[in-house]
Image: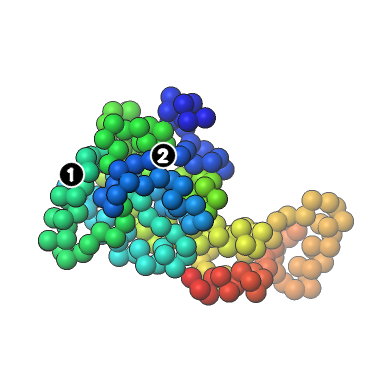
Amino acid sequence: MDYELMMNGTVKIGQKAPDFEAITTMGNMALNDYRGKWLVLFSHPGDFTPVCTTEMIAFTRAHTYFKQINTELLGLSVDSNSSHLAWVYDIYCKTGIQISFPIIADRNGEIARKYGMIASDISNTQTVRNVFIIDDKGIVRTILVYPMNIGRFVPEIIRIVQALQMADCSEAMTAANWIPGQPVIMPPPNTFAKLQQRNEEIQCNGNGISWYLSFKEPCQECKKIEEKN
């Protein structure tokens, strides 16, 4: 599988995240080090660049919120570890902000190519702004790709993790613009009898528009998880 991914650079939602070991600004790390936690693995085109600098600061400021939802951050670019360290230090000297998560030095591009982070139409070496949300079992749950000139909106990444965790816990789905505290969408019924029953429930409770779209409040266990977040 790893060899195939190296050749194709294709990672899909629902598959096991490709394993790796890497040198980072906080020592040697491996993907398995994050097992049991959710992980936001994101790439940036290069050190000492303007948009990337704002993103590193934004992710650091939001790191506490990610930790509250059992999620860690891990950056990556094809720059060297020395370059990462110099950049992180420069950010600290200029702003007083200490980057609170590791940044992978993927000098030969092995991890970037394994995850398909390099868009050959744009650059053969620089990574575009990819985001891979990997769950606590090591499964890829979300993939986002941004162009080089557009910074990421960190609150939306937090919301996606919260939505995934709520959907998992409640065995349901989340609607457009869902935010924590709102009802979730019930899976559609799979038999005609259940369809009729669902429509009766909607008529009685007013919790939907038809059998294929109805809502429910998350169970108490899921609400407790949400409250902690």
Residue 62, picture quadrant: bottom left
Residue neighbourhood size for the residue with mark 2, other residues' Cα within 10 Å, grouped as few (<14), some (14–19), many (≥20): few
Question: In the displayed structure, would residue 23 be above or below residue 71?
Answer: above
Q: Residue at x 58, y 74 (%)?
A: 224
Dot label at residue 20: 2
Q: Are marks 2 and 1 in contact (CB under 8 Å)?
A: no
Question: In the displayed structure, would residue 184 be above or below residue 47?
Answer: below
Residue 82, picture quadrant: top left
Dot label at residue 82: 1
Left or right: residue 192 versus residue 50 is: right
The amino acid marked with disc number 1 is Ser
* Tag 2 secondary structure: loop
Q: Residue at x 47, y 65 (%)?
A: 69
Residue 147 in view (yes/no): no
The amino acid marked with disc number 2 is Phe
Q: Position of residue 193 (x, y in %)?
A: 87, 56
Q: Residue at x 42, y 65 (%)?
A: 67
Residue 84 in view (yes/no): yes
